[in-house]
Image (tube, rainbow, N blue to C red):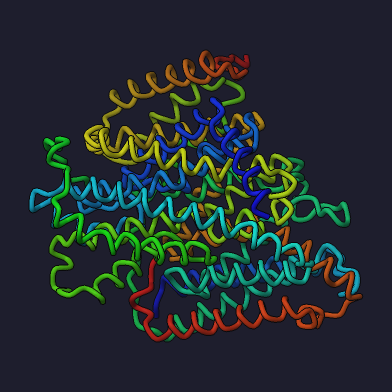
Amino acid sequence: MFEDMFGYLSIGMATALSPPNLMFCFIGVLIGTIVGVLPGIGPLAAMSMLFPLTFHIDPTSSLIMLAGIWYGTTYGGSTAAILLNVPGTTSAAVTSLDGYPMSRQGRAGVALFMTAVASFIGGSLGILLMMVLSPVVVAYALRFGPPEYFSLILMGFIAASTISQGSPVKSIAMVAFGVFLGVVGLDVNSGQERFTFGMLDLLDGISLIALAMGLFGIAEVINTAHGFEGEPIRARDITFRSMLPTADDRRRSKGPILRGAAVGSFFGTLPGTGPAIAAFVAYAVEKRIARDPSRFGNGAIEGVVAPESANNAADQTAFIPTMTLGIPGSATMALMLGALMIQGISPGPGLMTEHPELFWGLVMSFWVGNVMLLVLNIPLIGLWVRLLTVPYHILYPTILMFIAIGVFTVNYSSFDIWMVVLFGVLGYLMRLGGLPAAPMLLGYVLGPMMEEQFRRSLLIARGDLMTFVHHPISATILVLTAMILLFGLYRYYRNPTAAEDA
Amino acid sequence: MDVKNVIAGAAVLVIGAGISTYSVVNYDLGTFRQMGRGMFPAGVGLVMVLCGALILIPALFRGGGQMPRVGVRAAIAVTAAMSLMAATVRPFGLAPAIFLMTVVSSFADTKLGIFAAMVLGVILSLACYLVFGLLLNMTITFFNWPF
């Protein structure tokens, strides 16, 4: 296996370093950083907006760019968290706990520098893990059949619903609704339409872009357009010298960075968890094992570097289940899979062997991207700080413009724009009702696959529903799913006030 | 009564019931051996009904939760803006559509006056023409007159 590995790595490097892919990687991480720095837009909205662009470029480049946005936002999110106490991304929320106090003590430069370094190290360890583990997982996964896939998708849904914040029941309801939306259109098995109500435009199903942009883009704009109060940042002099950490800082950071990377790598692979949870857990771990826990919350550098290392590691390992099994653990991963599927590539264990240049090119591009981000985030930090001063009321019409054009240029059909409006309104109503949108996207992307595997399993088993339990691997997965569900429900109902959030 | 969650639960329940009923009535359910096109949507609808009930019923007995602030002005402005764009993009071309959309969406908050909004609209339509028309060379009609 290891002789193959060298061959794979070379293909990967060659693909990742080709000039077009270098450019797309750069575009991705640049946009990711900007989006990460700006509070109010998340990676999902940014990826949705660039999604239509991916039709015109080849699949490997698309993924490289989308991935760049994904892990790029994590680098940028800490900037606003440290300087403004307003995290640019949810995973950066923990960073502000100690990052903002540090900045008030005049140590903003050091905090920013160390988060960039911690992010790089965490990300690198995550990539290494991905390189080593993926072939192993794939080898195992090739033994999976339809019942196993169905159970895995079910587990993914349940895990995503219970592990993240908010009511599990609401999330499951939204997953179900998302599955329904995925069903709209032509049924592959019977060739008949479902839920199109005579509208020809719906025969191809509801457009993923319209759904994603409406739910996340438009709904977000409506949400923030009327209430956004930003504290003006004084573009303080963040010189290079003021950013260098002291020897004490360096000594204190070594352990937390490594521990954070370990925590992050673990949580990244699990479906339903992601960088945000990884960051929280890493912070909690450091606080637990610190010799003087009272320093946390007052500018302890461990509280800044551990979460940042964790969230970047989680970013990278999140690709493992997505690329090896074809089962995305979060809405953003689902979007990336959607990009692949639209290009005609079916994700799954076969992906690594059928399209090695795609898989390994993507993995190698992570290295390239992380290095680019290190450069973008250290010397150019002053630029991003200035970006935070753009007033929102000029920004959001621009965002709407990107959304509108992005959707329109796919099919040149105004029907798609109407869909965006519809899902925008729906998304906003859902936010008001506390119904989360991310599980819905997950359900939409995976729903058709789930139905396919369900049908196939039953066809092979000749209508025997117990087939899912008779296959041992599938049975194990189902038992795990039940445990996750019960645990999630128990944890939620014990503490409902803490979790109520859209 | 936790009004917010009562409404949310009721909505989920009603939509789920609608999906299931429509599937059962209009589509062939088939058997487990040979699933028809209606079986999966029917099942999904059922899950939604169940979840809706689980959200609705406890909310009926729970104390008042907070009703969220509805940004009516922003919602109407953005919706109207995008709808206007959807309606005008094919007959009138992309540039006027973007202009109209920008001006209408500026009503979402009070910070951008109508004149400034129009200026922004012109800038954005121009930027759009430069970037997508000239730079990326996409074949979009920018100006059109249907009469």
Question: Is A464 above or below relative to A417?
Answer: below
Q: Quadrant of the N terminus of chain B?
A: bottom left
Q: Which residue is drawn at 78% across and 55% down?
A: A194
Question: Is A319 above or below relative to A63?
Answer: below
Residue B28 location in percent, x, y?
87, 65
Residue A164 visible in this rendered orientation of the protein: yes
Residue B78 location in percent, x, y?
43, 41
* Location of residue B45 (image quadrant): bottom right
Q: Which residue is drawn at 80% across and 82% down?
A: A470
Q: In this view, does A451 lie to the left or right of A339?
A: right
Q: Residue at x 65, y 74 (%)?
A: B47
Between B54 and A476, which is closer to the camera in this rendering?
A: A476
* Location of residue A174 (image quadrant): bottom right
Q: Is residue A188 left or right of residue B135?
A: right
Q: Quadrant of the C terminus of chain B?
A: top right
Residue B88 visible in this rendered orientation of the protein: no
